[in-house]
Image: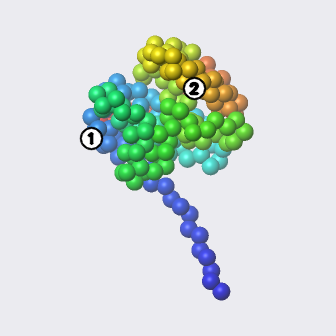
Amino acid sequence: MLAIIYQPVTMNIPSNQECFELIKKMAMMDHIIDHSVMVSNVALYLAVKLKKHCPDLDCRLAASAALLHDITKTRSIDTKELHSKTGGELLTELGYPEVGNIIRQHVILDSYENDSPVSEQEIVNYSDKRVLHAEIVSLDKRLEYIKIRYGTNTEFKKRIKLMWLNTLNLENKIFCRLDITPDQLSKNITIKIKKEEWL
C-alpha cells in the first residue's frame, strides 16, 4: 500500500527588510513610499483584528502585499503601464506569487463576494482606498480625489462609480466583523511599520 504524505504548502512572503530593499531598488518616489507604508499599517491592523473571525488570514501576507502594492507606480508615471498588473507580475517573477496576486487586485478585485470570509486581497484593496497620500481618510474623501485625478473620460467615470459601489459593500463586509466603525479607523491605527527603520 502506498502512503500519501501531505506537506503543507508554505508561502514565500518577503520580510520588511526585503520589501524595503525592493522599494529602494525600484527607486520609488518618497510620497509613494509614505502612502504604501500607511496602507501597510492599515492592512496589518485590519488583518490582526479580523483574524479572530477569519482564522485563515495571513497578517504578514497582507502587510507585505500592502507595502509593495505600488511597487511599479513610480515608473508607470513615465511608461503609462498598468501598475497593478506589472507590480503583480514583478512579485510573481521574484518568487512571491501570493503577494503578486494581491498586488494585481489592489485597484479592482477579481470578485466581490459578501458571503465569503474576508481575504488578504480585500484587506489590501480596501486599505488602499482609505489612504490618500499618507493620511487615513474617509471613502468619500478618497473618491473625490480619484474622480478628479482619474475621472477624465466617461468610461473611467463609469468604472470609478462601479468600483466605489463595490468598495462600499467591501467596507460593510469588513466592519460588520469589527468592534469599530469606519470613521474610527484612523484613531485606532498604531504605526508599526516605519520607513525610517529601513531606508
**Where does the image place residue 102, in percent across and percent down from the top left?**
50, 42
Residue at the farthest bottom position: 1
Q: Residue at x 64, y 35 (%)?
A: 112
Q: Point out the tag, 2 or 1, that comes first from the N-terminus.
A: 1
Identify the image quadrant of the N terminus.
bottom right
Marker count (numbered): 2
On screen, residue 186 versus residue 91, left or right, reads: right
Q: Please say if 88 is above or below 177.
A: below
Give the residue at mark 1: 25
Residue 70 picture quarter: top left
**Where does the image place residue 52, in percent across and percent down from the top left?**
67, 43
Identify which residue, 35 or 196, lies in the foreground.
35
The numbered mark at residue 163 is: 2
User: Would you say residue 8 is visible in this rendering?
Assistant: yes
Report the Cα–Cα distance between label 2 and label 1: 31 Å
**Where does the image place residue 94, in percent across and percent down from the top left?**
36, 51
Under mark 2, the amino acid is: Met
- What colour scheme does the image use? rainbow
Under mark 1, the amino acid is: Lys
Residue 185 picture quarter: top right
Residue 79 picture quarter: top left
User: Would you say residue 190 is visible in this rendering?
Assistant: no
Q: Residue at x 47, y 30 (%)?
A: 39
Residue at the farthest front position: 154
Q: Residues within 10 Å of mark 2 (few under 14, many from 20)?
A: some
Identify which residue, 38 or 102, lies in the foreground.
102
Q: Residue at x 47, y 16 (%)?
A: 153
Identify the image quadrant of the C terminus.
top left
**Where does the image place residue 129, in percent across and percent down from the top left?**
52, 25
